[in-house]
Amino acid sequence: MSLRTLLCFSFLVPIFISGCGKESTFSNASGSLGGAPVSDVAEAPMPEVAEDGDYSGGSDDSFAKTASPNHSETAEHRLAMPVSQRIATPPSPTRPKVDTTGETYSEIIESGFKSVSQNPRSTFSIDVDTAAYSNVRRFLESGQLPPANAVRVEELINYFTYDDKPPTDGRPFSVHTEVAQSPWNSQRQIVRIGLKGQEVERAERQPANLVFLVDVSGSMRPENKLPLVKRSLHRLLEELGDRDRVAIVTYASGVRTILPPTAANQQHRISQAIDSLNAGGSTNGSAGLQMAYQVARQQYVEFGTNRVFLCSDGDFNAGITREQDLIQLISQEAKSGVFLSVLGFGTGNYRDSIAEKLADHGNGNYAYIDSYSEARKVLIDQMTGTLETIAKDVKIQVEFNPANVAAYRLIGYENRTLAARDFRDDKKDAGEIGAGHSVTALYEVVPVGAEIPDADVPELRYQKPKTEPGDEHGHELLTVRLRYKLPSEDQSIEFAHAVENKSKPFRKASEDLRFATSVATFGMILRDSQFAQHLSWGDVRNWAQASLGQDEKGYRTEFLNLVAQAEQLVHRPYRADEVSSYYEQQMFVQPPQVTTLQEHVSGIFQTTDSGKVVTILVIIGVSYGISTLRNVG
């Protein structure tokens, strides 16, 4: 046997080896299914797919229960696979569902694109509430999709902290902006506006006058209601200082002050009062609110924190029960300088709509406590932000430059929008920001020259809007104006921040912009937004995984778990013509791996039966020996 023959034979060996396996698998080049046998893939039931790749078959119920593919979803895999194999396979049996028949949520009407020629300004109140995120988590972890109106996208985004620097100019908060190419549509841009509150060390926190208004009605008996409230209050008590005072008011059929204002260092007395809480009776929440404010005013701390914490499932069924009357009551009480924060608990009869509005009009924040870990996040980890307000009635007004922007849409904040004239009206209530709080708002912007989606107002018929500003502002994309009051003042302060018309590729944007965009996409898919029809869970997961950052508390990693749970409930077909595939080609397609001959041979030996390898080596050795003997002879 000549050396040339032997070499040729050696190159045929890998081909022979690859054909010796019991089952064939797809290679990465053709769209790996994670080593799944071809026979298994062929037998898996698949939904019907129309010629354009859209899902077209099955009932609504089967559609909602369809899970994600069980293979690795890289862009290279998805683009190489046939459309029919990009459709998700059925999930494991559904998990227990949550009874939400008695829960109420305010209607959310998603904001569409607005023409700059018709609406050059966008005005809204900030929102530091996080209740929607933990409530959505509660639904998903129970195996059920949240109602669309439970998904407030801005609260999902603002659940997370971002790496914005606090102010250095004496203002209570700083402003940061960033512009990048939109991953949803390459012809558009994403603008992130981020506020970062001044940070206050716990030792420097102002003394606090806290009144805990606890719902002890019969509906609060379950373990995730009153027992969780009591455990949370015990933990908060450990963090309070000698200058703080605590009172506890309860309400059910009647109202009781079970603990008058007491120095926080009297922990044994306060703990006894917490332990004495028991559920029973109807829910006269309005009488409880009036009593809690009265107790708070008795020990009012000038230049300190004066706050009522309402701990309830929001089910007010006695006393004042009409939502509008409750809002009027809270708005009047807020003028006393005592702020209201709402901590929501429980499932089944939860009244999110009331809880949100009470916090909004009570100059406070709103969190939903679905677990002890969430109570720790809100009351301990973010204690200074929860207790100490650094600015109130904070409004944002964005003016778009018509020379550079044709249309825009604000993502979320639907129930926080204001009229342009409300921006400088100091009588109009707006949101509060606490020490160290992060607030983020996202806009999707259509540059001049790009295709304009259907705007909400027809173009002017008889006049042409001005599209060219003065030369001095031609380089600007927009201007952000902010207006706020200091906690103890009634006069607003205003300042502006101009944003230049400079955009970067999405893959080069900050981790904060990319992560916030992934969370916004998550919310839009859950809401079945018209702007998310072409987006997939793979998009959310890929963008989030690439922008986790340090994630010291693990909140961003937990978000990936929620994405996986949502993926089990909402089917998103993968299509080759998705806009998301454009982004994946730009950022996530990895270059082909280059392997050495040694790595190639080693890989063959690792994936092949050792007996076959020995047999082949013996054949090679014998053949070479016979050839050598013939040459010697």
Image: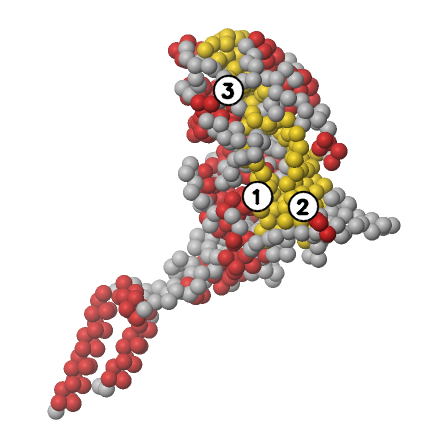
Task: Locate the N terminus and report the quarter of the image it occupies.
Answer: bottom left
Considering only order in the chain, which callout, 2 or 1, is on the residue closer to the N terminus? 2
Label 2 SS: strand
**Residue 552 position in % (x across, y down):** 41, 38
Residue sitting farthest toward the bottom: 633
Label 3 SS: loop
How far apart, in angstroms, are the residues tagged by discs 2 and 3?
37 Å
Residue visible at 71% across and 26% down in the picture: 426
Q: Which residue is mark 2?
A: 478
In the rendered image, the vertical position of residue 393 relative to residue 214, given as above or below: below
Residue type at the position of mark 2: Leu
Determine if residue 531 is in view.
Answer: no
Left or right: where does residue 227 sit relative to residue 580?
A: left
Q: Which residue is mark 1?
A: 520
**Residue 309 position in % (x across, y down):** 54, 19
Q: Are marks 1 and 3 in contact (CB under 8 Å)?
A: no
Considering only order in the chain, which callout, 3 or 1, is on the residue closer to the N terminus? 3
Mark 3: give few (<14), some (14-19) or many (20+) Cα within 10 Å: some
Residue type at the position of mark 1: Ala
Mark 2: give few (<14), some (14-19) or many (20+) Cα within 10 Å: many
Residue visible at 45% across and 11% down in the picture: 263
The structure's colour scheme is secondary structure
Q: Which residue is mark 3?
A: 206
Q: Quadrant of residue 592?
A: bottom left
The label nearer to you, 1 versus 3, is 3
Residue type at the position of mark 3: Gln
Q: Quadrant of residue 629?
A: bottom left
Mark 1: give few (<14), some (14-19) or many (20+) Cα within 10 Å: many
**Residue 35 position in % (x across, y down):** 38, 59
